[in-house]
Amino acid sequence: MYDLLIRGGSLVREDGIETADLGIAEGRIVDLAPELDGPAREELDARGLHVFPGAVDIHVHFNEPGRTEWEGLSTGSRALIAGGGTTFADMPLNSTPPVLDRATFEAKRQAAERGSHADFALWGGLTPRNMDRLPELAGAGAVGFKAFMSHSGLEEFESPDDYTLYEGMRLARELGLIVALHAESNSITQGLSARIRSEGGRSVRDYLRSRPAIAEVEAVSRALLLAEETGARLHLVHLSTGRAVTLAAEAKARGVDVSLETCPHYLCFTGEDMERLGAVLKCAPPLRDAGEVEALWTAIREGRIDTIGSDHSPSTLDLKERADFFEVWGGIGGVQSTLGVLLTEGRARGLTLPHIARLLARTPAERFGLTGKGRVEPGFDADLVLVDLDAEWVHTAEDLHTRWKYSPYLGRTFRGRVRRTLLRGQTVYADGPHSGGTFPTPPQGRFLRPAAPTPQEVTP
Ligand SMILES: NC(=O)N[C@H]1NC(=O)NC1=O
Ligand SMILES: [Zn+2]
Ligand SMILES: [Zn+2]
């Protein structure tokens, strides 16, 4: 007896698309075959729809507790699910207090167990203040340690200097956990910002000049050296330049344990768009030119980029409405759009559906030890997204489930629409005119503790 039988969907599997039935029991996929007999408590007709593994967004800022007015675990996870995600990993900032020890970790875990509609893992922070707390964060179940090589934008989350980063990586290696880095040079970005501001620079163009590509390239090369030296597992978040990707891919080829992430906004928008649209597109590293956008797409197509995270990091409107662009909060509202961007822009550039599923689900799940997530296969959690690939739609504010109804993707035409999202076999989102009301109460999200890396992932 299955709890659920999903009939006739086009399953997005590693080797291609296969039309088959899925038998689900106790939250897991237990059978997959061209035709299953049942019986089942419930059946779902998925003919004409593609069945993707639920996306695993390893990079979000839902900001709870402490800055729930910017976003929250409930609103953020609803948006994730409406966009085809089923698991996220929340960054240790901009929630406040930031997650720097066991107590702050447990506080966020409790908030997420109450409020999250998706399964979740949690990052701990690596700052000069909490080096002695990394072991207890690992014990509490942190998915890894996040550090900023440039100013984080928040006083309470300080960036480590090279010494702290070196020691932090050595410790993370001992603990078996990944270090995720925001890689921009503090000294280059701070130095340029100070000079440009002293000359009266306040515009979008001035902001872009204050964070040039070399700031990323230099920090990435330093991070790779430190990872190579310490043997730490490294995850480079939000890479924005082809040069940084090349450096990291070369390091990986010679054995450095590094994974590469980029974000949808670096694949959709340029610095000129930032000048045109303003605050809704402010982010760090900043948007680049059209050449960099295509360099990132090429790197994705050629398999040099491992994962795509949203880096969803919105704020209240007043922090977005500043005349001085340097004072505008930097962070994009994009958690709901990642799959849509890949299905639209990625497919237009020749990405296959299995490749999209790998970037958004399988690879992040495997890299971060989220066992049972990320694949449409027997034995895996029934975290599934039913997509109508032919549906064309224009994104409006009414579609958004985020706390603030702004997004740089509003007005854009997407191809491929999420019709239904299942978390461990339960429908947690259904598309429709009243889709705002379909989220289950209480929220179903569960905490995920990372599994230890498999032997072949452990560097000697
Ligand atoms: N603190 C925070 O969320 N910062 C993020 N925002 C952004 O644009 N880049 C980031 O690193
Ligand atoms: Zn960052
Ligand atoms: Zn971030």
Image: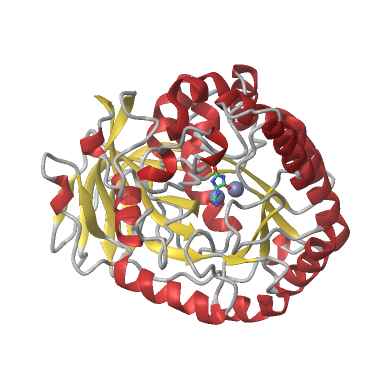
Give whichever of 305, 337 is nearer the camera.
337
Which residue lies at the image location 13% right of the left edge and 53% below the top edge? 437
How many numbered marks have been drawn onto this rendered protein structure? 0
Which residue lies at the image location 56% right of the left edge and 26% below the top edge? 203
Q: Where is residue 8 shown, x and y percent of the image?
A: 24, 41
- Horizontal relation, residue 112 to residue 392: left or right: right
Q: Where is residue 208 shown, x and y percent of the image?
A: 63, 28
Give whichever of 74, 442 is nearer the camera.
74
Q: Where is residue 358 shown, x and y percent of the image?
A: 51, 43
Q: Where is residue 424 shown, x and y percent of the image?
A: 31, 62
* Residue 304 picture quarter: top right
Question: Up-down: is 122 above or below 240?
Answer: below
Is any part of residue 127 visible from this angle? yes
Question: From the image, which quarter does the C terminus lie in?
Answer: bottom right
Which residue lies at the image location 46% right of the left edge and 20% below the top edge? 276
* Residue 100 picture quarter: bottom right
- Horizontal relation, residue 100 to residue 214: left or right: left
Question: From the image, which quarter does the N terminus lie in?
Answer: bottom left
- Horizontal relation, residue 423 to residue 352: left or right: left
Extreme residue in the right direction: 229
- Horizontal relation, residue 298 to residue 66: left or right: right
Question: Up-down: is 118 above or below 418?
Answer: below
Give whichever of 61, 47 is nearer the camera.
61
The way the protein has been coloured in the rendering is secondary structure
Is any part of residue 33 visible from this angle? no
Question: Up-down: is 206 above or below 145?
Answer: above
